[in-house]
Amino acid sequence: MKEIKQNSPHAWLLAARPKTLTGAIIPVMIGTSLAFADGQFKIVPALLCMLFACGMQIAANFINDLFDFLKGTDRTDRLGPERACAQGWITPGAMKVGIGVIVILSCISGLGLLYTSWGELPHGGWELIVLGVFCVIFAFLYTTVLSYQGWGDLLVLIFFGFVPVGGTYYVQAYTFTPNVIIASLISGLVIDTLLVVNNYRDRDQDALSGKRTLIVRFGEPFGRYLYLWLGIIATLLSFWFAQGWNYAGIFMPFTYLYFHVTTWKRMVKIRSGKKLNSILGETSRNMLFMGILLSVIIAITNR
């Protein structure tokens, strides 16, 4: 890789890990499609939710980068993509400032939901402030404590499923529906496949670092089949939105499942080592594909 100047814009871009923004975009897209299907779509709150979600994803990446470096988790035998602090691209002091800046900017975009827009009612009240505070707190707790105790998968279901999907829908429709619950589960399950790939690849290094992920606790076969069943269950749940079992509603989820199973087979064949990083890219692609498919199914078949 070309030499990267310390604390340069290029270094910050790498630290932000823009490819991970897929995980922030998908839930907001799904929540917005639910609002559209119910005739409640509002572009301003949807965009503000997108900005907040992307900002918090970048903040979480910065926090992960810094605290894994400080804990010594990013060792020389690291299998995943290189990290900015560990490589010296960004100094720890600068990263702390970066975390503060991106958290503040994210909160500013979130606070925009508290004000009226073009004569409309406010998009939310005190409950959104509480939700935003929890997002910030858990962005720190995840990297520093909870991911080391095996809570990562549950937190993905909450903060990449119920919180962003439900929150995006709520600020547009001011209510919740059973559809929001099902869509949140699908979003969380699909996005969790990315975490599972990371933990599957890093299982040996995590065990040495004292990071007790579910795969470290229960072993490689558990991780292998956890990845597979996350995609299967998400696919089955998507049929909730295929009203009348129309052809589009049936065919589209199975298209995702085909790609998911194909990626799973490659993951199992590779089994360990840096080659599993290619599965990260495929899984991210599959996630985005499912997010788009589900959004289309909801928007078209549920109006």
Image: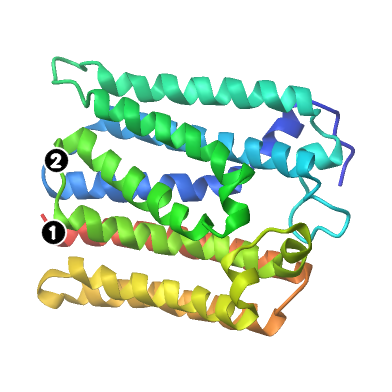
Q: Is residue 26 visible?
A: no
Marks counted in the figure total: 2
Q: Label 1: few (<14), some or many (≥20) within 10 Å?
A: some
Q: CA distance from mark 2 to mark 1?
A: 17 Å
When the figure is inspected, residue 125 is found, relative to residue 31, above or below; the finding is above
Give the residue displayed 18% in from the left and 57% down from the top: 179
Q: Nearer the viewer, residue 159 or 21?
A: 159
x and y, in percent, of residue 275 in the image: 75, 70
User: Does residue 180 appear to the left or right of 286 in the view shown?
Assistant: left
Give the residue displayed 48% in from the left and 32% down from the top: 136
x and y, in percent, of residue 108 in the image: 42, 19
x and y, in percent, of residue 126 in the image: 25, 23
- Observer-side mark, 2 or 1, equals 2
When the figure is inspected, residue 122 is found, relative to residue 75, above or below; the finding is above
Reading the image, the residue beneath label 1 is: 302
Element type at marker 1? loop
